Image (cartoon, rainbow, N blue to C red):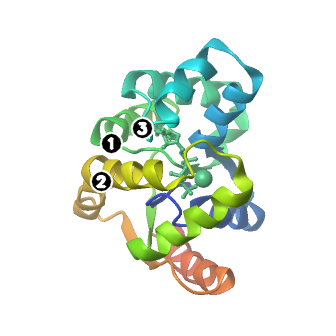
C-alpha cells in the first residue's frame, strides 16, 4: 500500500508515520528529513533547500519531485509500499506522485489527513522549537508556514476527497488514540 500522511506543520505526521512503519513495515519518506539531511551534510542541494526552509517557503516543485524520484529509485524496497510524509504539498506534486507511482506499477491508496486546530499547531511548533534546533520553528516562520499550508497545501484535501482517497483523522488527543484511528482507516482501504 502507498499511504500519504497529510496535515499542517506540527500536525504529527512524523510521529504517526513512525508508528505506521512499525505496524506495516512500509518504507518511510519524510521529504523534510531528506532536505534536512542535505543541509546537515552541507551539500549544494542542502544550501538551496535551506534558503527556502528557513523562510518557511516550499522548495520548488520540479526540484522536490526530482528528489523524490531519486529517493524511490535508490530504495527498491519502496515498491512494496511507502508512507509519504510531507509530500505532496501542492496539486502539481500530487499529479507528479501519481506519475511516479504508476511508472513503478503502483498507485496511491489512501491519504490520511491529520486535522488539528491552528492554536494547537502553533503551541506544538513553538515547543518543538525549544529543542529541535530547526531554523523554521520560530514564531515568524511558523506563521509563514501555516499561510503556505493554507494556500498551497490544503487544496489537496478536496482534490483527494473527490478521488475518494481522503480520510480525515482527528489529530488531537493521545498519540495512541490517534494511531488507533489511523489504523482503522488504513485497514478499511486495505480490504478495498
Ligand atoms: P510536521 O511537523 O508535521 O512533520 P513540518 O511542516 O513541520 O511538518 P517538514 O515536513 O519537515 O515539517 O518540512 C519542513 C520544510 O521542508 C517545509 O516548510 C518546506 O520548506 C520543505 N519541504 C518539505 N517537504 C516539501 C515538499 N513536498 N515540497 C516543498 N517543500 C518541502
Ligand atoms: Mg515532520
Which residue matches tag 2?
156
The residue tagged 1 is 90
Percent of width and height locating residue 29: 63, 44
Tell me the quarter of the picture where residue 35 sits: top right
97 relative to 69, above or below: below
Residue 187 in sight here:
yes
Q: Is mark 2 within 8 Å of ligand 1?
A: no
**Element type at mark 1:** loop
Mark positioned earlier in the residue sequence (2 or 1)? 1
- The residue positioned 56% from the left and 28% from the top of the image is 50
Instruction: Please state if 96 lies on the left or on the right of 155 as rendered.
Output: right
Disc 3: which residue: 97
Q: Are marks 2 and 1 in contact (CB under 8 Å)?
A: yes
- Total numbered badges shown on the rendered structure: 3
Disc 2 versus disc 1: distance between alpha carbons? 7 Å
- For ligand 1, tell me if the residue under mark 1 lies within 8 Å: yes
Mark 1 or 3, closer to the camera:
1
- Label 3 SS: helix
Which residue is located at x 46 percent, y 47 percent? Answer: 141
Measuring from the top left, give residue 146's x and y in whole percent.
37, 56
Q: How many residues crowd mark 3 within 10 Å: few (<14), some (14–19), many (20+)? A: many
**First-in-chain label (1 vs 3):** 1
Residue closer to the observer: 71 or 105? 71
Amino acid at each position: 500500500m502507498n499511504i500519504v500522511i497529510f496535515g499542517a506543520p506540527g500536525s504529527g505526521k512524523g510521529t504517526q508515520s513512525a508508528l505506521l512503519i512499525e505496524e506495516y513495515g512500509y518504507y518511510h519518506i519524510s521529504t523534510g528529513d531528506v532536505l534536512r539531511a542535505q543541509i546537515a551534510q552541507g551539500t549544494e542541494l542542502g544550501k538551496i533547500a535551506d534558503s527556502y526552509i528557513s523562510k518557511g517557503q516550499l522548495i520548488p516543485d520540479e526540484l522536490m519531485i526530482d528528489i523524490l524520484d531519486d529517493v524511490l529509485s535508490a530504495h527498491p524496497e519502496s515498491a512494496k509500499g511507502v508512507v509519504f510524509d510531507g509530500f505532496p504539498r501542492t496539486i502539481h506534486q500530487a499529479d507528479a506522485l501519481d506519475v511516479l507511482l504508476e511508472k513503478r506499477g503502483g498507485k496511491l491508496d489512501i491519504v490520511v489527513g491529520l486535522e488539528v486546530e491552528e492554536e494547537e499547531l502553533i503551541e506544538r511548533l513553538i515547543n518543538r522549537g525549544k529543542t529541535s534546533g530547526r531554523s523554521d520553528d520560530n514564531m515568524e516562520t511558523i506563521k509563514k508556514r501555516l499561510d503556505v499550508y493554507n494556500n498551497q497545501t490544503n487544496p489537496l484535501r478536496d482534490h483527494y476527497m473527490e478521488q475518494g482517497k481522503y480520510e480525515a483523522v482527528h489529530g488531537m488527543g493521545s498519540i495512541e488514540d490517534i494511531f488507533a484511528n489511523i489504523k482503522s482507516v488504513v485497514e478499511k482501504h486495505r480490504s478495498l
